[in-house]
Image (cartoon, rainbow, N blue to C red):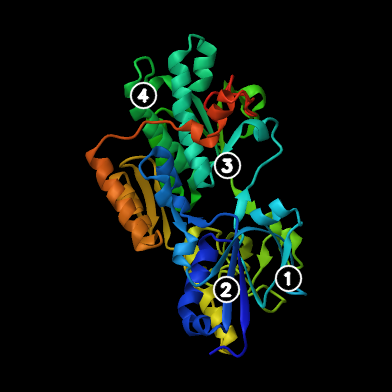
Amino acid sequence: MVKERARILVVGGGYVGMYTALRLQRKLKRELDGGGVEITIVTPDPYMTYQPFLPEAAAGSISPRHVVVPLRRVLDRCRIIVGEVTAIDHAKRTASVTTLATEEERTGGEQLSYDELVLAPGSIARTLPIPGLADHGIGFKTVEEAIGLRNHVIEQMDIASSTRDPAIRDAALTFVFVGGGYAGVEALGELEDMARYTARYYYNVRPEDMKWILVEASDRILPEVGEEMGRYTVSELRRRNIDVRLNTRLESCVDRVAVLSDGNRFPTRTVVWTAGVKPSPLLAATDLPLNERGRLKCTPQLTVEGTTHAWAAGDAAAVPDVTAEEPGKETAPNAQHAVRQARVLGDNIAHALRGEPLETYSHKYVGSVASLGLHKGVAYVYGRKLKGYPAWFMHRVYHLSRVPTFNRKARVLAEWILSGLFKREIVSLGSLEHPRAEFELAAGGKHPHNPTNDPKGSS
């Protein structure tokens, strides 16, 4: 049993936040039942998004509802607060929290006290001061962005099909993806696959009419799968008439024209930004130590360095990699480490409350898998290299085993089976993004997104 009553505050409901709270529910079941421990989770969304499935959700292979896990159902012993932590004063053990209710009440937020702090706010898109990016760029980090991008791509095909202006048609059928990591390559591969299939239902849009461009600032893509598999991925994408441009940067996208560092200009209505992530801005609003990259300095036991009663893992934490040969190396901020760190983190909090010795996080990176569309993929696992259908199959099996809860596993598997028996869905539901637009027009109001130019509210 724990020595004294403990209030545990978990900031963030992503991989680390959800899995840490789930581990604590199991390890501290008696204490939770007896009131000796209280777990509170503050998260902007009441669900955890399984991000490796976002490309398939965008392509329509999986329903977006099945990419997310409702926190209140999984963490039934925890208190879930949908809101944001804006600042943390760890010296006083308090966190400033704003919720939908505090915004309505206009009280300026509330102070939440805690005894143990778990910081897992995740990361946000790492953007650059590129002219026009904030106005025309589309992200690909949340399920809402995945749905919006799918709607947007199909809507551009509708525009191209119905216009007589060759300039508008060319811009609508040009899709630029910036960033050659997992998010960019998988999103591009899945959406190109989906658009090529969808084109068969348009009498005047052919797959070869579309331009798909991948822009990467370095000399390789997918570095996690190794140099050889990275070269194969470039060859595979180019075989599908995807224009892969290495050692190239996006200079501007003002007026819907993508200007690249190699001098090329592409009129386009679609610029998808997947060029990396950076730690949550919340970390700068704490009194906890950060490294030069803005991540929390942590120990191998997942405590925040130089402090007590503060823990961190995942994208926000700089955790030493004890398995690495070179000194000072940190674990990569990816899902493979986040899920495993969360388990050790939950165990160590339970150990600390009971006065037991802490465990050291140790995990040797086993490899990576990536999907490039239906029946296409690359993998580098335990030194073995796979490509094509075997890699794609391994990608699906691996992520099906990792998606949380049996409920989601069963639903995703059922959708994959049904998608193999029936045709793809090619419907765009762009009006989901601004559902009141039609009513506002009918009521005589003026829609803020100017539905005259943008009838469905697409990006």
Q: Which residue is mark 3?
A: 218
Alpha carbon distance from label 2 to label 4: 50 Å
- The disc, 3 or 4, on the residue closer to the chain's N-terminal end is 4
Q: Which residue is mark 2?
A: 39
Q: Secondary structure at mark 1?
A: strand
Alpha carbon distance from label 2 to label 1: 15 Å
Q: In the image, residue 235 lies at what x, y percent?
A: 40, 36
Give the foreground label among 3 and 4. Answer: 4
- Determine whether label 2 and label 3 are within 8 Å by CB: no
Q: Which residue type carries mark 3?
A: Ser
Alpha carbon distance from label 3 to label 4: 32 Å
Give the foreground label among 1 and 3. Answer: 1
| 129 relative to 46, above or below | above
Dot label at residue 94 = 1
Q: Which residue is mark 4?
A: 199
- The disc, 2 or 3, on the residue closer to the chain's N-terminal end is 2
Quarter where residue 136 is shown: top right
Tell me if residue 221 can be seen.
Answer: no
Q: Which residue type carries mark 1?
A: Thr
Residue at far front of view: 443
Alpha carbon distance from label 1 to label 3: 43 Å
| 335 relative to 274, above or below | below
